[in-house]
């Protein structure tokens, strides 16, 4: 164990001891799409029992006849102790538990489709650093988010739990990973024995529970793993493939080896996949959707592709040009899935690289399944990802700026910007999630964060000059209310 790992574990232990003396979980852990926070200061291990009791009570409110859940956890150092509390709580309420063990979030999503269960719970903090942990919650085949999370918080705050059962729930263990891998092999027979060359950065996350066994099953002799060992302290880098600085080791590995077709980065719980070209270009989520949409729309002309409001306008234009139907969704994988259901969409995704297929899949976000669809695309084209990406539209885009701003001020700013542009006939306006504006030579999105007191802004121009003009325009407007000098950097 190295110094970084020992220090991380020591900090977790100290936080846990101190907060056990002084309080309950922070209200900030109840987010829009999950329950998540820093273990010891926000998310307290000793309160995991009552959090699980709140979730069980919510499940029973929605379905009084529910009996059995699947339970999984990623490889974080505190997941074992949290899991003990969760099993104790769920069992005390008479809920049967199928313990899947250490796995990815997609394996838990898979369980909802192949096991005789009513709900599922995944212990994970996704792409967050090792000091975080939390819950992703499912019922039926759907993610619980928004109003569901707020109801769970209300149950927790008021301690209005249902009565414990007279008979405890039954606990059984199951290796669902084997079935999950067999399912992937069945869906991609053309990739068995493939000569595709790839380097996959697991980031020491839960992907390590799947990929060594998958590589063996698929007989991939030219696919290598980077940081494939599960280590909940994440000693090499944060497992977030959408952030350039965390993908530098993958970039170096790709550039040091000849003949590689594609690089892949996976996040901590493996529901996201970020591709990288052999030359080291990190592909954004909206660019990935362009690559994956083309063969779908060639096969299903008129098909719908859903993407979140932060995705580029070029995605909108390309889908239309290929005869498809573009549809905007609120940010968040759960919101994208909901919109996909409404639109009967083939594919959906968001800028952070959540990608959801209804074509040839169950319709949940799975980084490994998305990786295999990209492998399929690369193999069928006969080209590396660098060459495939030559067809992507060239635009100049800003990062997503996250500027401190209260929720009430966010609403004032967005309303002011909306009123400023609503009389311009050449500007398209969308209010799906915040305010999105389509200009002749670019676009902009302003939205209030669902989880933090910040306003999120992203700008894109047809050229770097167009982008700078947009930056100047929005700096002039926003600087009346907030410090936003970073727009001009």
Image (cartoon, rainbow, N blue to C red):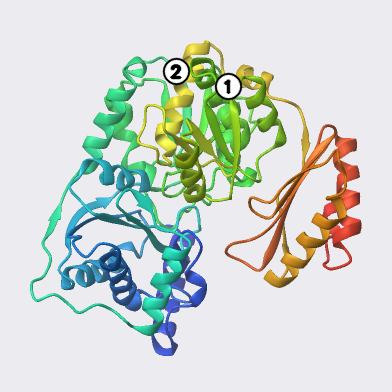
Q: Residue furthest bottom?
A: 21
Q: Which residue is mark 1?
A: 385
Residue 212 locus on image (x, y percent): 32, 34
**How far apart are the two marked residues, 1 and 2, measured between alpha carbons?**
11 Å
Q: How many marks?
A: 2
Residue 315 appears anywhere in the view: yes
Crowd around label 1: few <14 · some 14–19 · many ≥20 (10 Å): many
Residue 454 locus on image (x, y percent): 68, 64
Residue 11 locus on image (x, y percent): 46, 72
Q: Secondary structure at mark 1?
A: helix
**Residue 417 appears left or right of 78:** right
Residue 149 locus on image (x, y percent): 43, 66
**Residue 250 appears left or right of 108:** right
Q: Nearer the viewer, residue 134 or 296?
A: 296
**Residue 31 appears left or right of 245:** left
Q: Residue at x 33, y 78 (%)?
A: 46
Q: Residue at x 57, y 64 (%)?
A: 451
Residue 71 appears anywhere in the view: no
Q: Which residue is mark 2?
A: 196
Q: Nearer the viewer, residue 7 or 178?
A: 178
Q: Secondary structure at mark 2?
A: loop
Q: Nearer the viewer, residue 124 or 263?
A: 124
Snapshot quadrant of residue 50: bottom left
Query: As displayed, is residue 236 above or below residue 319?
Result: below
- In which quadrant will I find the N terminus? bottom left
Q: Which mark is residue 170?
A: none
Q: Residue at x 87, y 45 (%)?
A: 470
Label located before the other in sequence (1 or 2)? 2
**Residue 128 appears left or right of 213:** right
Query: As displayed, is residue 230 above or below residue 163?
Result: above
Q: Residue furthest left?
A: 167
């Amino acid at each position: 164990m190295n110094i970084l790992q020992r220090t991380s574990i020591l900090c977790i232990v100290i936080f846990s001891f101190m907060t056990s003396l002084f309080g309950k979980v922070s209200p900030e852990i109840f987010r829009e799409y999950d329950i998540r926070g820093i273990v010891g200061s926000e998310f307290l291990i000793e309160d995991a029992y009552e959090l699980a009791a709140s979730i069980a009570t919510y499940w029973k409110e929605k379905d009084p006849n529910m009996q059995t859940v699947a339970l999984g956890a990623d490889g974080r150092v505190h997941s074992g102790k949290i899991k003990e509390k969760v099993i104790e709580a769920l069992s005390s309420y008479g809920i049967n538990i199928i313990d899947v063990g250490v796995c990815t979030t997609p394996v838990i999503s898979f369980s909802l489709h192949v096991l005789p269960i009513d709900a599922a719970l995944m212990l994970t903090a996704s792409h967050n650093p090792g000091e975080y942990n939390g819950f992703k919650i499912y019922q039926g085949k759907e993610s619980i988010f928004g109003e569901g999370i707020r109801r769970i918080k209300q149950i927790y705050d008021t301690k209005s739990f249902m009565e414990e059962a007279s008979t405890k729930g039954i606990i059984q263990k199951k290796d669902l990973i084997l079935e999950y891998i067999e399912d992937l092999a069945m869906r991609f027979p053309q990739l068995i024995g493939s000569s595709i060359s790839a380097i996959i950065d697991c980031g020491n996350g839960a992907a390590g529970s799947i990929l060594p066994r998958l590589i063996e099953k698929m007989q991939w002799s030219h696919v290598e793993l980077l940081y494939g060992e599960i280590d909940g302290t994440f000693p090499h880098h944060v497992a977030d493939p959408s952030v350039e600085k965390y993908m530098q080791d993958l970039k170096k590995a790709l550039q040091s080896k000849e003949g590689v077709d594609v690089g892949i980065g996976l996040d901590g719980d493996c529901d996201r996949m970020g591709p990288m070209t052999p030359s080291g270009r990190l592909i954004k989520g909206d660019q990935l959707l362009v690559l994956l949409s083309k063969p779908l729309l060639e096969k299903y002309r008129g098909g719908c592709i859903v993407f979140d409001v932060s995705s580029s306008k070029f995605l909108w234009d390309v889908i239309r040009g290929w005869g498809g139907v573009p549809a905007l969704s609120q940010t968040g994988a759960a919101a994208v899935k909901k919109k996909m259901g409404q639109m009967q969409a083939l594919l959906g995704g968001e800028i952070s690289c959540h990608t959801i297929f209804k074509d040839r899949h169950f319709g949940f976000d799975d980084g490994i399944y998305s990786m295999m669809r990209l492998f399929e695309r690369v193999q069928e084209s006969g080209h590396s990802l660098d060459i495939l990406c030559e067809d992507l539209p060239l635009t100049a885009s800003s990062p997503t700026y996250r500027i401190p701003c209260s929720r009430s001020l966010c609403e004032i700013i967005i309303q002011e910007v909306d009123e400023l542009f609503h009389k311009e006939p050449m500007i398209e306006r969308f209010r799906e999630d915040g305010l999105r504006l389509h200009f002749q030579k670019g676009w902009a999105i302003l939205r209030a964060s669902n989880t933090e007191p910040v306003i999120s802004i992203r700008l894109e121009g047809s050229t770097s000059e167009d982008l700078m003009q947009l930056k100047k325009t929005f700096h002039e407007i926003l600087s009346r209310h907030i410090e936003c000098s970073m727009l001009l950097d």
